[in-house]
Amino acid sequence: MKKLNSIELRQMWLDFFKSKKHSIIKSASLIPENDPTVLFTTAGMHPLVPYLLGQPHPGGNRLANVQKCVRTGDIDDVGDNRHCTFFEMLGNWSLGDYFKEDMIKWSYEFLTDAKYLAIPVERLAVSVFEGDSDAPKDTESAKIWQECGIKKEQIFFLKKEHNWWGPAGITGPCGPDTEMFVDTKKPKCSKDCSPACNCGKYVEIWNDVFMQYFKNADGSFTQLKNKNVDTGMGLERTLCMLNGFDSVYETDIFTPAINKIEVLSGCKYADNLQAFRVIADHIRTATFMLGDERGVVPGNIGQGYILRRLIRRAVRYGRSLNLTQGSLAVLSETFVEIYKDIYPEIYSNKDKIYAELNREEERFSKTLVAGLKEFEKIVNSLNGSKIDGATAFKLYDTYGFPIEITVELAGEKRLTVDTQGFDEAFKAHQAKSQAGRRREFQGRTGGRKRNCYKASYGHASFTSRAKKEPDELKRVEELVNQAIKDAHNITVEEMSVEEAKKAGAIGLFEHKYGELVKVYTMGDFSKEICGGPHAQNTSELISFKILKEESSSAGVRRIKAVIG
């Protein structure tokens, strides 16, 4: 296998697909533009969905790139040898152009050729779709792999849960995939050992998705006229495998930060693996979130909440290593230096990144020591092995501990947390706050009923550190007034949160909802989760005028407006 650093692997990928007549496209923002169902871009194909559905791409029918990605489902797993919250996805796409034969042959070439990754053929294993009532066994892919040189015993037919992608919603493009693995040469865990096992014998390196079907509303599948290819290879895991490292944190992407933590803390990485890895991962992710062209700031909702959670988790682990205040920004500098030529926005936004990290670290540090003391008091006075929800909410409300930190601290003490009770306390707090806001609203409007919109006042909060410019506020006014003029009917439906996501409703999906939510649809202008009540038609609002825009809390600003 060829030993490569991150710069060499990125360039090799792009050069390879350029030689196959692909247009090289820029990484999209980490913040999805038109998908309210997710907080961050999770894969290379995510920003390309409109083009996979048939919209022509300005780059043509063959595309390749390296995409910035964040997946939040792995936060609690960070600290092991392979999980990261931020990662880079090497990807290529065919939009109705080439299909299985070309893609599999190119995959084999890139993996095995001495000019590229030079992985010995005997170290490769692949999986393909075994077939079911929806689609037949993918013997075509298996045959192409054999023609390339993969032995029959290294080709595994697996179920849909392992070798099928999509659709993204209830209906849409989907199809079988073929995944590529490196055989670590560890002994088989059983006679049925395969890439579907988690025993560690097979390590996934690449995935080719063949979108050849469309799933219809009735659950049936039909063949697509234009078949697409979507592939993905994780940069960090591939570097780890090629270089024979035990973890991604030994790659050139992380070693500068690991070394810097050793200097700043006086502690050894080998003695504190989890703490070092969590800090390095979370600060890299925070650096990209803050430095993104559509960057966010720490807050209590949505992307801002995830960012705050990562920074505060890094602060907690940092204190266990005796890192002094200001260390997070110093660590961020190492990542800015690594990525400044690859993602220039990180460098151009470096001052904002450091300022926000310092601000959030200072804010949490003030309550962290007191909160940890309070946690120890709770543990010492505990009658049983579970921390109740009201107590967990106090740690959140008073000391700024995200529930995930309380759960993590409790786990270290072999305790559990009543997270359902926490959710109930959180909702009760929200209801109390909302009731207070309603009383305030009624006081301002002379106690008028909600269905009387003439000269009513309202406000809307959003995550941002910077004051909005007058032309931005004017544009918001124009959009809202146009929606009022267009007289959209407003309808309401009750559905599950999952159904609301699939329907494209805007909502703070990282927060907790009940089993059913109300989804309000205003024509084709807006669809969102809300408690209501609402007007029956946007025209009832008459007009919308922004009175002021101001800071509401750290990282949150508020628009106040008059309606009618």
Image (cartoon, rainbow, N blue to C red):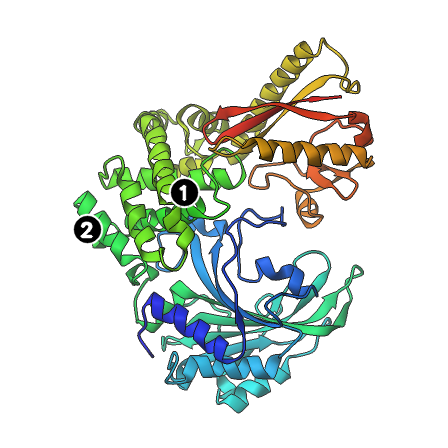
| Picture residue at 34% right of the left edge, 73% below the top | 242
In this view, 166 is above or below 137: above
Q: Is residue 167 visible?
A: no
Please state the horizontal and vertical placement of residue 8, each as a whole percent of the image.
Answer: 35, 71
The quadrant in which the C terminus is found is: top right
Q: CA distance from mark 2 to mark 1?
A: 22 Å
Q: Please report whichever mark, 2 or 1, sits nearer to the chain's N-terminal start.
A: 2
Q: Nearer the viewer, residue 303 or 370?
A: 303
Instruction: Please name which of the two marks, 2 or 1, marks the residue nearer to the observer.
Output: 1
Q: Which residue is mark 2?
A: 268
In this view, 386 is above or below 102: above
Q: Which residue is mark 1?
A: 310
Q: Nearer the viewer, residue 172 or 388?
A: 172
Local SS, label 1? helix
The quadrant in which the N terminus is found is: bottom left
Please state the horizontal and vertical placement of residue 60, each as a whole percent of the image.
Answer: 61, 71
Q: Is residue 257 visible?
A: yes
